[in-house]
Image: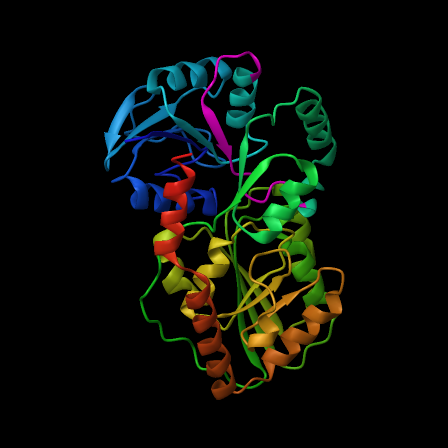
């Protein structure tokens, strides 16, 4: 079997680092019978100051048919030593800007790595994502191109939008388009009755500029809505300064709009949590997949999202809203429209979105495409 080394900043038992972990887990579960898989990752979750408890560090651990190495130090020396130890046929990177990827690129530049590298930027090259900490990213991209670090690398795009973003920066590289793997949620949920002029909205994501929660709160604050809106926010407050700005807007909201911060929700509880709402609100600046969006659609919530995701033209299917961030009045109109939905109309939209996501995700074909990619 081909030896596949997956390098990802976060892996199980991480729960706060977003959809990448779930994508990698689904990939490992789907491919472990066909590849000898090892995973190189960090020793802690997103934002954690301490390493995982009861996890052995800096050694190979056998788990679920794979080898996992949790590194106590993420640097070029430690990463290089374990790449040499594993001697993989393929190295699969799950970030463009992360220190793990930078280390691999420098090792490649020094001639220490001859292995085929496949790099998944996971939406980090989208214009919205590049606008955050833009100066640092511009400097890195300048030297990346100057040193020709992309030479020989195969890029993995998970959506058409992702492919366009990669092509814009690296037009001469090979780019393979394969959707993120996703283990389907087939459980049936009963959603709350939808009364006219009453709406339960939810945001589940990291609280960070790229997820654009502040934009959503400003829409609620700057428009008049007739009826009662409950808006619950779940997710780690990754960016404290940004979350403070959000809280300042929340204080200004009118009495008919109730916003509550519910903290972090475990991945295993996301489906049951989503089932308490009608509308999933995520005006993100960019998603290469958007696990939380997909899970909301599988449960039957109407998505109110930006057009910076793979899930577009929802309006044509009467299955939700995928709108331009340049027109915030469109978001207000969408909320007002759903606010006056009857329960029957809401259930029609809910069934439409479940049908839409069911047709879009083909797990069997996706895994077959990955098998071809990693046998390159």
Q: Quadrant of the N terminus?
A: top left
Q: Quadrant of residue 15?
A: top left
Q: Residue at x 53, y 87 (%)?
A: 342
Q: Position of residue 315 (x, y in %)?
A: 61, 74
Q: Is residue 238 above or below residue 248?
A: above
> In this rendering, would 307 be left or right of 91?
right
Q: Position of residue 18 (x, y in %)?
A: 48, 46
Residue 214 visible in the picture: yes
User: Which contiguous range is marked in magenta?
Assistant: 109-126
Residue 90 % position (x, y): 41, 28
Image point 34% across, 25% down: which residue?
Answer: 69
Q: Main secondary structure of the magenta part?
A: loop
The answer to whether any part of residue 275 appears in the image is: no
- Nearer to me, 218 or 329: 329
Q: Position of residue 209 (x, y in %)?
A: 65, 47
Type of colouring: rainbow
Q: Is residue 176 toward the left or the right of residue 181 in the image?
A: right
């Amino acid at each position: 079997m081909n030896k596949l080394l997956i390098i990802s900043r976060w892996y199980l038992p991480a729960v706060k680092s977003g959809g990448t972990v779930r994508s990698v887990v689904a990939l490992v579960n789907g491919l472990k019978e066909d590849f000898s898989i090892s995973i190189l990752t960090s020793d802690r979750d997103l934002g954690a100051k301490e390493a995982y408890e009861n996890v052995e560090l800096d050694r190979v651990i056998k788990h679920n048919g794979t080898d996992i190495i949790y590194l106590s130090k993420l640097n070029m020396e430690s990463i290089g030593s374990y790449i040499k130890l594993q001697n993989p046929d393929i190295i699969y990177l799950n970030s463009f800007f992360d220190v793990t990827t930078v280390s691999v690129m420098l090792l490649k530049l020094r001639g220490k790595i001859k292995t085929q590298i496949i790099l998944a930027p996971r939406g980090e090259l989208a214009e919205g994502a590049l606008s955050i900490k833009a100066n640092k990213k511009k400097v890195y991209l300048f030297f990346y191109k100057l040193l020709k670090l992309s030479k020989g690398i195969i890029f993995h795009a998970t959506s058409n939008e992702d492919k366009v973003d990669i092509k814009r920066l690296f037009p001469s590289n090979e780019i393979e388009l394969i959707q993120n793997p996703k283990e389907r949620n087939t459980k049936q949920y009963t959603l709350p009755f939808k009364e006219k002029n009453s709406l339960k909205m939810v945001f589940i994501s990291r609280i960070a500029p790229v997820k654009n929660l502040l934009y959503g709160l400003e829409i609620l604050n700057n428009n008049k809505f007739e009826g009662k809106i409950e808006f619950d926010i779940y997710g780690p407050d990754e960016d404290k300064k940004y979350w403070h700005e959000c809280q300042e807007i929340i204080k200004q909201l009118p009495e008919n709009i109730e916003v509550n911060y519910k903290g972090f929700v475990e991945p295993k509880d996301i489906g049951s949590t989503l089932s308490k709402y009608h509308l999933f609100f995520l005006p993100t600046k960019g998603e290469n997949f958007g696990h939380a969006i997909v899970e909301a659609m599988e449960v039957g919530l109407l998505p109110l999202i930006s057009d910076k995701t793979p899930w577009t033209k929802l309006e044509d299917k009467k299955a939700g809203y995928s709108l331009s961030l340049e027109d915030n009045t469109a978001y207000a109109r969408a909320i007002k429209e759903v606010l006056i939905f009857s329960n029957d109309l809401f259930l029609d939209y809910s069934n439409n979105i479940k049908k839409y996501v069911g047709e879009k995700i083909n797990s069997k074909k996706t895994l077959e495409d990955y098998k071809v990619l990693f046998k390159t």
